[in-house]
Image (cartoon, rainbow, N blue to C red):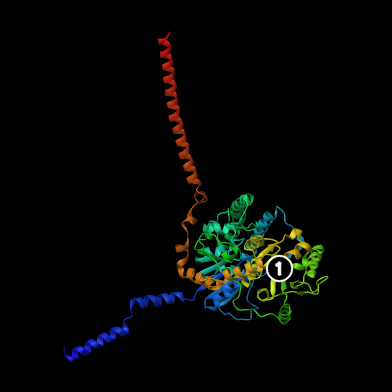
Amino acid sequence: MKTREKICLYLIHFLLLTTVVPSSSLSSSSGAERKNKKLKILGVFSHPGKSHFDVFKPLLEELANRGHDLTVVSYFPRTNSSSALPNYKDIDLTGPEGVFLEIVDLKKIKHSILTVYREFMLLRHWGLEHCQKNLANRDVQKLIKSNAKFDLIITEVFNSDCFLGFVHRFKAPFIGLSSHVLFPWANARLSNEHNPSYVPTVLLGFGPKMNFMERVGNYVIRKIFNLGYEVFYNRPMQKIVEKSFGPNVPPLGDLAKNMSVILVNMHYSLQGSKPNLPSVVEVGGLHISEKQQSLPGDIQRFLDDAKEGVVFFSWGSMIKASSMGEETLREIVKALRSIPWKVIWKWEDEDLPGKPENVMIKKWVPQAAILGHPNVKCYLAHGGLLGVSESVSAGVPMVIVPMYGDQFNNAAAARSRGVALVLEWNNLDAESLKAAIDKIFNDQRYKKNAKALQKAWHERPMSALETSIWWSEYVARGHGNYYLKTAAADLTWYQLELLDVIVFLLLIILIVILVFYKIVNVIIRKIFTSLQNFQSDFSKKHN
């Protein structure tokens, strides 16, 4: 080969190497580009409960920190936040009534056989009221009428499907968030079937090991909840939604079935192992920061000096502890005075009548940070899932006095894991409270179980926040509903219950029985006829 030709070939080869990119590189490049795409996300949260939004807030802020544009409709704008997030836009729902903070009057808490019914109807009332008010909000109306485009919608799954109107309006995939164990209607929309023989229904307070009558109640209440939600919640809500989004909004129940994923604030280590679809993702402890929060100086000194141990007493953000009756307060104070350990108590008033010397009161406390202090040995809780999760995360055993909502189920779950004693609010007195605290301190089984549960709680492939981020971006990239939706979601209720199959089989059995009856009847008649003929012939021969 001539020198000139060799040079030409070398040049061509060099140009090909420097300009042609392998197809695999192109593919991975475009895949990375899609993965790193800046998403437009709409978050809509219609419930004014602070404890609910505290679960969702870390996810929303982290999505913004990662460069995505967020528009968040809620009662909890970031106006007073110390960190600026220019790509996080708030639409504030707060009205004159404010948010749900220290609104529960303990003098009105009285448990009876009607408690579940009252709470079910109260949730309905809140859902309808907030739906009406929130959709009438001027800024919400502007959003509805805008030409905005979204890659993903994130909304709470609780007592209202009101904001699913945005899913219809913007035609975007959506995921649900739940701050607690799922209600039956949340499972039903995904056809995420839970066997009522061992999976307790929220509000009932049953543990996983139910007796016969509890299983009967669990099964019946679950069916009533699912039917009641569609009839008493969604039907009147449909009219409110159609007034804002137009008359062509599909039934809210049908829209709900298009949810790609639901992120649930629970973990099998606490609530128990149960079968879930891939679209039901456990992210228990999502609200718990991996960074240790610092304690105020006086609380730090109080805890550091309590080498013998501390009881942490907090009943959450919605209960106003100082609203309890005088007799109950005297009993609690009497119990706390009689124990040899220090107590730090979230108490909303300036003074605590008859405050014992071993008790420190604070209007506000950094709960997770206190539970993380090594001298805290017992958590006197009301069973709210945020506090219970923080206690599990810190390895601290509990005395729980459940008041309402999912607190009964959370308390039952903690008791079944051997990390809590549960007391009844109706029968709370100094003797029972002191005995429970004494047992938590002196029976080493509770400490041992709490540490074992803490280890199981923390050992995960990814943190709750990283898991939530991954699924949010996955669905926004268009991989969600098509691949995750089960075929069961398209079946009718009677097909899911296999009623058509049962009726068919019963008909087959009935037909078989009838045919068998006819055959036997014919055989018997023939035998009977033959006997008659034989007898007749026999009589003729011998007469």
| Percent of width and height locating residue 456 | 57, 69
Decide which of 224, 212 is in the foreground and name it: 212
Position of the N terminus, as image quadrant, is: bottom left
Position of the C terminus, as image quadrant, is: top left
Q: Is 186 on the left-hand or right-hand side of 115? A: left
The quarter of the displayed image where residue 63 is located: bottom right
Decide: is 347 above or below 416.
below
Q: Is residue 251 visible?
A: no
Decide: is 497 above or below 312.
above
The number of numbered discs placed on residues in the rendered structure image is 1
Q: Is residue 331 visible?
A: yes
Residue at the spot of label 1: 442
* Amino acid marked by disc 1: Asn
| Percent of width and height locating residue 420 | 67, 64
Residue at left 66%, top 80%?
A: 294
Given the current orientation, which residue lies at the most extreme right position?
Answer: 354
